[in-house]
Image (spheres, rainbow, N blue to C red):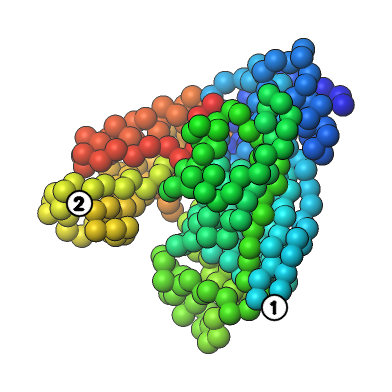
Amino acid sequence: MQVEQNKSLKTYNTFGIDAKARFFLEIRSLDQLREALRLEQFPEKFVVSGGSNMLLTKDIEALVLHIHMKGITVLSEDRDHVTLKVMAGENWHGLVQWTLERNYGGLENMSLIPGNTGTAPIQNIGAYGVELKDTFVQCEAMDVFTGELHTFSKEDCKFGYRDSFFKNEGKGRYIITSVCLKLTKRHHLLNTSYGAIEAELKKNKVSQITIQEISKAVIAIRRSKLPDPAVLGNSGSFFKNPVINKEAFEHFGATHPDAPFYKISDTAFKIPAGWLIEQCGYKGKRFGDAGVHQNQALVLVNYGNASGTEILDLAHRIMATVKNRFGIEIVPEVNII
């Protein structure tokens, strides 16, 4: 294994922040990962995969391990279902397209989500009414202290809204190496009720709804709202949609009767963070090279040379404005480094 020094991480994070790794190592196998974790001359390790869910605000002094393990394997299948094992370095959208080519259903609503498969359980990624946990079976993760592989069931992962065991108790302890998913081969559950999917299907005059058509609709919607990280640096949705209790919702609804919302339960309501931010006048605003996307206020962008600190300062300004105007706290979805 060859350790590189003073490696730019600009192409390893979708924000395009030009932070540097003092030491950098590409990981392509479990054996390489285990060996890298044993390098005593580098006591601190920092893991990077697709780089789609982090904001780098400083250079990384630790040994950066770039997880690049590839492979998709069919573990089992019957007439109705197939179970896949997907290595952590597989691009998520590439995986979705791979499943659609084989008419495997379950991931189509999560088309075009940036990042790699290994980081999907950390966030419990989701979009348009579907979350990773809906198809998740288990994942394998390596203990950074012992090099042992552990299997985590869905229950072990403690999935929540953009949350999991790996963001809390397991943070910094485990590196996810593969993910197992159970998908449908027929009788697919077609989820079109969330967001603008039905309108997009109608616009395209789709008479027979399939998982492939749903994916095309989701891709079109996302491309109309979200910038391509290869063109304009971003990490997708920067903030979580806040969930408030019934009392807070009733107060909010009384003062803002036209505000959109999603009822989660009789006592919990989700308010779109993008709507809150847009009402505060930030949509499309630019502050130097840091800004808020013109088509989606939930997305912070790097127009070229913004530092991570400048983008974080903008995020804090937005959070404070929303809190002051609506009494609702919004928090980042991305990891701040």
Residue 246: mark in rendering: 2
| Residue denoted by label 1 | 79
Residue 42 x %, y %? 73, 15
Mark 1 or 2: the one toward you:
1
Q: Crowding near pointer 1: few (<14 within 10 Å), some, many (20+)? A: few
Which residue is farthest top? Answer: 41
Q: Quadrant of the N terminus?
A: top right
User: As rendered, which of 81 and 236 lies closer to the eye?
Assistant: 81
Residue located at (72% from left, 69% from top): 77
Q: Quadrant of the C terminus?
A: top right
Q: Secondary structure at mark 1?
A: loop
Residue 8 x %, y %? 71, 26
Residue type highlighted by circle 1 = Arg
Q: Secondary structure at mark 2?
A: helix
User: Seen in the image, is 226 located left or right of residue 280?
Assistant: right
Residue located at (25% from left, 36% from top): 323
Distance between mark 1 and mark 2 Cα atoms: 44 Å
